[in-house]
Image: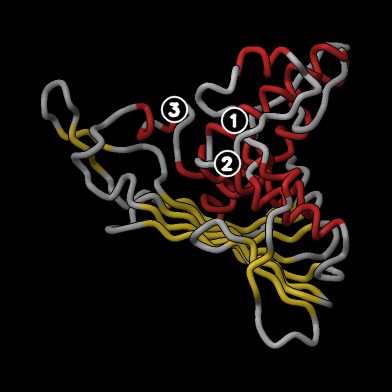
Amino acid sequence: MAACARRSSQVAMIDHEFRWQPARALVKELLDQGYVGTPWSVSAVSHVSLFADPERPPYSWWQQRERGAGWLLNSGTHLIDTLRWWLGDVEAVSGFVATNVKQRKRARDGAWVSATADDGFGALLRFSSGVQAVLHQSGTAAVGRSNLVQICGSDGVLAIDDRDRVCGARRGEREMRVLEVPPHLRAGAPAAGDAPAARLADRTAPPAAAFTQMETPAFVCLALEFAAAIDDGVTREPSVVDAAKTQEVCEAIERSSREQRWLRLPLD
């Protein structure tokens, strides 16, 4: 698909909507402005309880690797896209995938079915810029939800905490503080009664409501980007070509897990 997109004049984009999530967008701005100086290292850890119970939700495509499922290929792609958006291309990968809940109950007959897809993964990434990253995500935490992303650099530190707040500190400051998301990054999906159809029709008018959820408002912003790209006839980011690079990182993590070794990108 990426090769076809390179040869084509058609718009070819992918739905990595979390680039429009306010905290991630603010980190991108601050990194581009040099808030942390030269980025050195990243850690990203996420544990959620979506698949901890082997009976709920019941067995579905989510447990079938042959249907493109797995925590890495579904949740992990968004994280890796974000890190590549922030920090550039990845040049080397070492990682693992794991299936912790190995069987799930099927709803239609109550039978127990083996899971072929992973429900957690971990990776070490080395970026072309020299940044080192440590990633770990799991969909099988027994209780709750925790997420943390932290970037350390020569002159500062940035983090996104469990409440999707951006925290930061620069060299010489005693501790990290919550950084305010500026208004231009808070625009999200239109609120009820906010004439969304008319607003969507006007490509120049940003949605007025503040973000209240993580996925839907960001996707509305992405849809507006899709529409503007189609109107202009010019592909914008995130492109299918860009998504292929993220997919390659995921494939390298899976292959590294099988072969128990570091892999350099691009893959052979």
Q: Is residue 214 above or below residue 149?
A: above
Q: Nearer the viewer, mark 2 or mark 3?
A: 2
Question: Residue 70 location in percent, x, y?
Answer: 45, 39
Q: Residue at x 66, y 13 (%)?
A: 198
In this image, 210 relative to 163: left or right? right
Residue beneath disc 1: 189
Q: CA distance from mark 1 to mark 2?
A: 7 Å
In this image, 254 relative to 138: left or right? right
Check if mark 2's residue and mark 3's residue have beta carbons within 8 Å: no
Residue beneath disc 3: 66
Helix or strand or loop: what does disc 2 sit on? loop
Residue beneath disc 2: 211
Few, some or many C-alpha atoms within 10 Å of disc 2 (few <14, some 14-19, many ≥20)? many
Quarter of image, res 41: bottom right
Q: Is residue 164 above or below residue 77?
A: below
Question: Residue 56 location in percent, x, y?
Answer: 22, 39
Check if mark 1's residue and mark 2's residue have beta carbons within 8 Å: yes
Q: The residue under label 1 is which amino acid type?
A: Ala
